[in-house]
Image (spheres, helix red, strand yellow):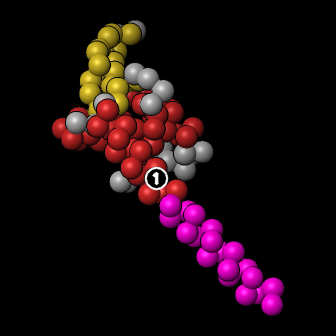
Amino acid sequence: MREPTFFVLTALLGGRKHGYALISEVGTLSEGRLTLQVGTLYGSLERLARQGWVEESGTEVVAGRHRRYFTITSQGAAALETESARLTDRAARATALLGRYREGFAL
């Protein structure tokens, strides 16, 4: 799973969001490392919808601007859970190897 997908799905765990709210939340969750562009975000959301990981959950017009809202699906949450477990496992392996590496220098 690519990092933007990971953060978009993570942001949607907090509930229904429109595009600009997702851009802001992804920036916050990634601690500013990831800045999504509007076109990239909506392309990703459409791809994730085709995969069944997100779904459109309404629209509204605010100050003359059309907003589309999205939510994560159970399939999307399951994919995110799998990816989160994979990342946790990799981080644990790297941490263990770092410990051994440091021990080698302590000798």
The residue shown at (34%, 45%) is: 79
In the displayed structure, 74 sits above or below 34; it is above
Quadrant in which the N terminus appears: bottom left
Q: Which residue is mark 1?
A: 85
Quadrant in which the C terminus appears: bottom right
Relative image position of residue 22 (x, y in whole percent): 44, 31
Residue 24 placement, left or right of 76 = right
Name the foreground residue: 98 vs 30. 98
Residue 105 placement, left or right of 45 = right
Seen from this angle, which residue lies furthest left?
50
Task: Please tell me whether the stretch drawn in magenta is mainly helix, strand or loop.
Answer: helix
Seen from this angle, which residue lies furthest bottom?
107
Graded by Cα atoms within 10 Å as few (under 14), some (14 to 19) or many (20 or more), the crowding at tag 1 reads few
Seen from this angle, which residue lies furthest right?
106
Chain part drawn in magenta: 89-107
Given the image, on which type of amino acid does mark 1 rest?
Ala
The residue shown at (44%, 57%) is: 86
Name the foreground residue: 24 vs 2. 2
Relative image position of residue 92 (x, y in whole percent): 57, 63
The residue shown at (46%, 53%) is: 85
For residue 70, which quarter of the picture?
A: top left
In the displayed structure, 66 sits above or below 37; it is above
| Element at label 1 | helix
In the displayed structure, 83 sits above or below 62; it is below
The residue shown at (21%, 41%) is: 51
